[in-house]
């Protein structure tokens, strides 16, 4: 029923793409002046639903209705969406890094005077907009890429707000933000809500959804599962709705006895990013690395791995000092790196599962440079079985696998050379709840095999759920290492901002 | 029953992964079919013999280019190296150097030229387009310098006859092509180096983080390419029975076209030697057929250009599905 209470009413929406039904008779209603969370696994249909609302996709003809502020609306393209008061801030900020803040905000709509861009008006108006959102520290003439991540995010929000939007969509805005920055974002969202703006908030991080939303809707496999008041539902309930089955704890950890020291790093220095880093890693242990974006966690691992140059310092593996100048040195010493960007750094996407699984091990299985395809096939089949990798065949190109399975291939690559020390860099980002848990269970299995893991993550609940000890890195230095029992989110954050 | 489904799925998968090669074969056969109908001279021993022999030189160059393009690089100097190699071998032969030694020295020089390109690209971080553009001028300059801008004649008869003789009815130059293609196919599909080329093509970072020796592989790719261009230059000189300093001009474009029609992507990690050869044959068929039918060669040139664009267009469409 059309209702003045609702800012957005999507009823019975179906959307079919060739070969797949992305949305099946989905209902979605957002009240005026509420922050409404939209959650679901990858592929649940959240993006598709919102793209239909924004005019990027068209719902199947004959299916359902969309009402905005009580009136039926035809949204055929993003411009019409904007005219109806809709605006979106996407996960991958659609802004031009080399242009100024003002140019970005007025992208496509530069104010003109007699056909020429009115620059002074543009900068003045931008200043007003920024001030109205308490963003006085952002310079309207500054190049966008000179701002911090959160400031860039804020510019994206300012842009959305400047289009006089009363319905805002935030799609995974906190993926790149640290805790403090997320808090700031949430404060701004509440401020907008108080001004009467309705907000749709898509976020994988359920604790953040609970922080700021009034109600939450769950989608699963293109279907509408339900909508609940935040006060009447728990994280576990949401997860069960998202996954369709009880998943128990989000995290998985077994108590495994720690063995001897397998990796020792002493006073490691590398350029500006690694400053006098020292720590120890034991067999059977998961050592977490926490820190703000840019603190130097990835750089520290890359330096140990031999990608970035070591200026000074010592690395000992199994009590023996090793000289690491190139990745092959650390690989031969038993280290494997599962990089942050699995698509650009971890996998050769156009190549097959077999090629990727044996990318490093072919060094050992080949003779005189000739590949031993029989051995590779056996290794790959074993990897698929051991790690439960879902793929139609070993020759399937890796780019067609799901995120979780792709990550497993990267891990398999290192297991096939018997790596005993594994570096996981933000390895569960963009992976479904169920697949994440599989990776945690896999980690426990590896630990039981006497391996050791360093686990980089920006998500505190994950670190607390999965690590034995957590090292905090700030500006290239290790500011502290806390045991699991004594670590709290506050303590870790404090160390990260030293 | 499960065995049968598994077998059938394997076949379907194989076909799916190789559909572009199958399409290429079909296009080539279709073209030959059409030309056979349109001209009684097409499907004759003489004509096919010429067609295949003419393609041989450019196909050798294209085979080398296949490696470069799969690695997400490009080499614009191949035409000039063909010319330079032709001049060097000519000069050595005219001065009485035994054929085998002359060939070896020439190929060695080509390896050095390839190493220089590799050096600019790997050590200097110069984009391959620019580095090889520079080498293109340098190698051509070398050819003109050494020859004094003159056509070099007086090559030993044994050398010149090489391009004329046949082996079991197949032109000798084509035999060389077959050997080159077989070796390249083997290296690309069955050696670590071959896989490294694909890996580097998909992402430099991935290759580096997997312990691949980037320096060795980068040099190897450009040196191999220069080597094959050198071979092509020697083949061409035998065909022309003289050292022509401007020979090979424009070969880089034909080579790139063959590789791209053959299914490679300029962004790397895709492509095959077989595809390249078919690509080269398709272009040669277009020219040969055009000649037989008396089509104005200028029209032919436009048609060739259009063919290249269509081939890539078709591939992009296929990828979107």
Image (cartoon, coloured by chain):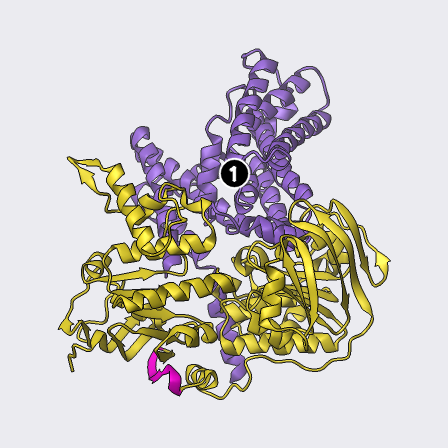
Chain colours: A yellow, B purple
Task: Name the residue tied to disc 1.
Answer: B74
Residue drawn at 55 percent across, 38 percent down: B60
Location of residue B318 by image quarter? bottom left
Q: Label 1: state its secondary structure.
A: loop
Tell me which segment is drawn in magenta.
Answer: A222-232
Is B260 included in the stretch rendered in magenta? no
Residue at image position (82%, 54%) is A322
Q: Position of residue A127 (x, y in %)?
A: 31, 46
Task: Residue A187: give x, y in percent of width and height.
Answer: 39, 65
Quadrant of res A367: bottom right
Q: Which of A159 and B281 is in front in this view?
A: A159
> Can residue A6 be seen from the camera position used here?
yes
* Residue A226 is inside the magenta segment: yes
B151 sits to left or right of A282? left
Near-viewer residue (A378 or A5): A5
Query: Which residue is rendered at x = 45% and y = 35% of the image?
Result: B254
Estimate how packed mark 1 is, as few (under 14), some (14 to 19) or many (20 or more) residues with alpha carbons within 10 Å.
many
Q: Is residue A225 above or below residue A74?
A: below
Q: Quadrant of the C terminus of chain B?
A: bottom left
Q: In this view, does A354 lie to the left or right of A119?
A: right
Please indicate whether residue B91 sits to the left or right of residue A28 in the image: right
Label 1 is found on which chain of the structure? B
Image coordinates for residue A89, horizontal then vertical, percent: 35, 60
């Amino acid at each position: 029923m059309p209702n003045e209470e609702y800012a957005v009413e999507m009823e019975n929406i179906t959307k079919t793409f060739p070969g797949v039904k992305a949305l099946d008779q989905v209902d979605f209603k957002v009240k005026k002046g509420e922050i409404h969370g939209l959650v679901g696994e990858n592929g649940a249909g959240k993006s598709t639903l919102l793209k239909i609302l924004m005019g990027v996709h068209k719902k199947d003809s004959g299916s359902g209705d969309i009402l905005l502020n009580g009136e039926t609306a035809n949204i055929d393209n993003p411009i019409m969406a904007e005219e109806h008061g809709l605006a979106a801030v996407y996960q991958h900020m659609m802004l031009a890094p080399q242009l100024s803040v003002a140019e970005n905000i007025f992208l496509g709509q530069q104010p003109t005077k007699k056909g020429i861009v009115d620059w002074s008006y543009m900068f003045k108006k931008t200043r007003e907009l920024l001030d109205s959102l308490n963003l006085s520290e952002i310079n309207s003439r500054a190049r966008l890429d000179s701002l911090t991540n959160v400031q860039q995010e804020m510019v994206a929000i300012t842009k959305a707000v400047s289009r006089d939007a009363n319905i805002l969509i935030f799609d995974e805005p906190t993926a790149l933000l640290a805790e403090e920055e997320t808090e700031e974002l949430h404060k701004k969202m509440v401020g907008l809500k108080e001004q009467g703006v309705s907000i749709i908030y898509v976020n994988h991080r359920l604790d953040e959804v609970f922080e700021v939303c009034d109600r939450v809707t769950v989608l699963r496999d293109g279907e509408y599962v339900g909508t609940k008041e935040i006060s009447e539902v728990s994280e576990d309930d949401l997860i069960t709705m998202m996954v369709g089955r009880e998943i128990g704890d989000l995290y998985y950890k077994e108590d495994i006895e720690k063995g001897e020291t397998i990796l020792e790093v002493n006073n490691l220095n590398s350029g500006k990013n690694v400053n006098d880093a020292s720590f120890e890693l034991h067999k059977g242990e998961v050592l977490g690395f926490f820190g703000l974006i840019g603190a130097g966690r990835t750089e520290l691992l890359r330096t140990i791995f031999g990608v970035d140059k070591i200026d000074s310092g010592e690395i000992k593996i199994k009590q023996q000092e090793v000289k690491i100048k190139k990745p092959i040195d650390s690989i031969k010493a038993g280290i494997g790196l599962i990089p942050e960007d699995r698509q650009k750094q971890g996998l050769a996407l156009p190549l097959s599962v077999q090629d990727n699984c044996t990318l490093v091990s072919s060094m050992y299985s080949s003779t005189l440079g000739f590949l031993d395809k029989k051995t590779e096939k056996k290794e790959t089949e074993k990897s698929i079985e051991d790690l439960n990798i879902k793929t139609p065949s070993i020759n399937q190109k890796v780019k067609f696998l799901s995120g979780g399975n792709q990550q497993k291939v990267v891990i398999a690559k290192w297991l096939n050379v018997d790596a005993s020390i594994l570096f996981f860099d933000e390895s569960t980002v963009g992976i479904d709840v169920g697949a994440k848990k599989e990776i945690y269970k896999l980690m426990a299995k590896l630990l039981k095999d006497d391996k050791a893991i360093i686990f980089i993550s920006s998500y505190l609940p994950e670190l607390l759920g999965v690590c034995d000890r957590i090292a905090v890195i700030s500006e290239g230095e290790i500011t502290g290492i806390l045991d699991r029992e004594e670590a709290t989110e506050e303590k870790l954050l404090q160390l990260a901002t030293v | 029953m499960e065995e049968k489904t598994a077998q059938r799925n394997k076949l379907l998968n194989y076909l799916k992964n190789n559909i572009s090669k199958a399409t290429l074969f079909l296009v080539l056969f279709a073209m030959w079919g059409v030309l056979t109908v349109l001209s009684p001279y097409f499907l004759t021993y003489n004509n096919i013999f010429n067609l295949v022999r003419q393609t041989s030189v450019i196909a050798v160059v294209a085979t080398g280019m296949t490696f470069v393009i799969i690695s997400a690089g490009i080499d614009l100097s191949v035409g000039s190296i063909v010319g330079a190699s032709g001049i060097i071998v000519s000069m050595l032969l005219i001065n009485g150097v035994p054929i085998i030694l002359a060939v070896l020295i020439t190929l060695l020089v080509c390896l050095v030229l390839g190493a220089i390109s590799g050096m600019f690209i790997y050590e200097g971080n110069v984009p391959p387009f620019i580095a090889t553009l520079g080498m293109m001028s340098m190698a051509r300059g070398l050819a003109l310098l050494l020859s004094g801008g003159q056509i070099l004649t007086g090559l030993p008869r044994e050398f010149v006859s090489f391009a004329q003789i046949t082996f079991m009815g197949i032109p000798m130059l084509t035999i060389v092509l077959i050997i080159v293609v077989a070796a390249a196919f083997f290296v690309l599909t069955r050696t670590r180096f071959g896989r490294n080329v694909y890996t580097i093509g998909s992402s430099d970072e991935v290759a580096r983080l997997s312990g691949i020796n980037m320096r060795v592989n980068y040099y190897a790719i450009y040196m191999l390419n220069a080597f094959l261009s050198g071979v092509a230059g020697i083949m061409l000189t035998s065909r022309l029975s003289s050292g022509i300093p401007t020979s090979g001009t424009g070969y880089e474009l034909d080579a790139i076209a063959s590789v791209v029609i053959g299914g490679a992507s300029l962004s790397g990690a895709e492509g095959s030697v077989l595809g390249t050869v078919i690509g080269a044959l398709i272009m040669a068929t277009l020219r040969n057929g055009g000649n037989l039918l008396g089509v104005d060669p200028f029209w032919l040139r436009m048609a060739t250009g259009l063919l290249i664009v269509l081939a890539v267009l078709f591939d992009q469409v296929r990828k979107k599905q």
